[in-house]
Image (spheres, helix red, strand yellow):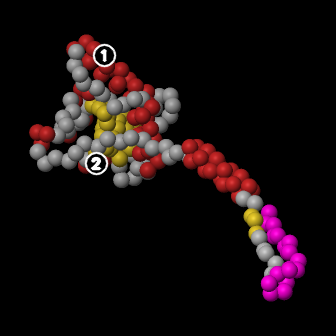
Amino acid sequence: MAEMDTSSSGGKGKKHGGTKSKKLSTRVDMTPMVDLGFLLITFFMLTTTMSKPKTMDLIMPKDTENEKEQNKVKESTALTILLGKDNRVYYYEGLAQDPNASADPNFFKATSFANTGGIRDEIIRKRDEVARLRNSKGEPEDVVVIIKADDDANYKNFVDILDEMAINRIQRYATVDISEQDKKWIKSTETANGVQ
């Protein structure tokens, strides 16, 4: 609240004999402004702590030209997951670098993101299998999941599979470009199941 002092002295007995001009004094009460400042500070402190972005830490290996320095994955500890169109998920155990590896009819399997019987159950099964091998042989290896997305896969499915890695506590996983052989396996599985 602003106040003005408009009091004046009479001017009698002064040198010049005239009236003295009025002294104006303004005083602004800053209490409401301070209250507002503290309210704003409190509001921004609370909203800042509640709106932290939710991100996932992703540690990427450094690129190297020398093939000996690249991380090698054992066939027995690898699980390869392929993301297809229309929320379809395919998987096989190992790296399948040999095109003739699909001689076994149960080699290449299809599943979904369902909570029961989906890809999560397969990840848990493989993680437990590798843990049993590690404990019996004393090997320091852990399960390695290789994620490959088809050209028709959507971004949501890619984020979902990364969420599965976090949910199932998979420490070692990699995203790799899909190979032509993987695309052929997806196509033949879709054809066999009557999917267009």
> Label 1 is placed on what type of residue?
Arg
**Residue nearer the viewer, 145 or 12:** 12
Q: Residues within 10 Å of mark 2 (few under 14, many from 20)?
A: few
Q: Where residue 177 is drawn, which disc sits there?
A: 2
Q: Quadrant for the N terminus, please.
A: bottom right
> Label 2 is placed on what type of residue?
Asp
Question: Label 1: which residue?
Answer: 132
Residue at horizontal 25 percent and vertical 47 percent from the top: 179
Q: Position of residue 157 (x, y in %)?
A: 44, 45
Instruction: Say whether residue 34 is magenta.
Output: no
Residue 104 quadrant:
top left
Disc 1 is placed on an element classified as helix
Is 13 on the left-hand or right-hand side of 26?
right
Q: Position of residue 30 (x, y in %)?
A: 72, 59
Q: Where residue 40 is drawn, which disc sits there?
A: none
Disc 2 is placed on an element classified as loop
Q: Position of residue 141 (x, y in %)?
A: 24, 24
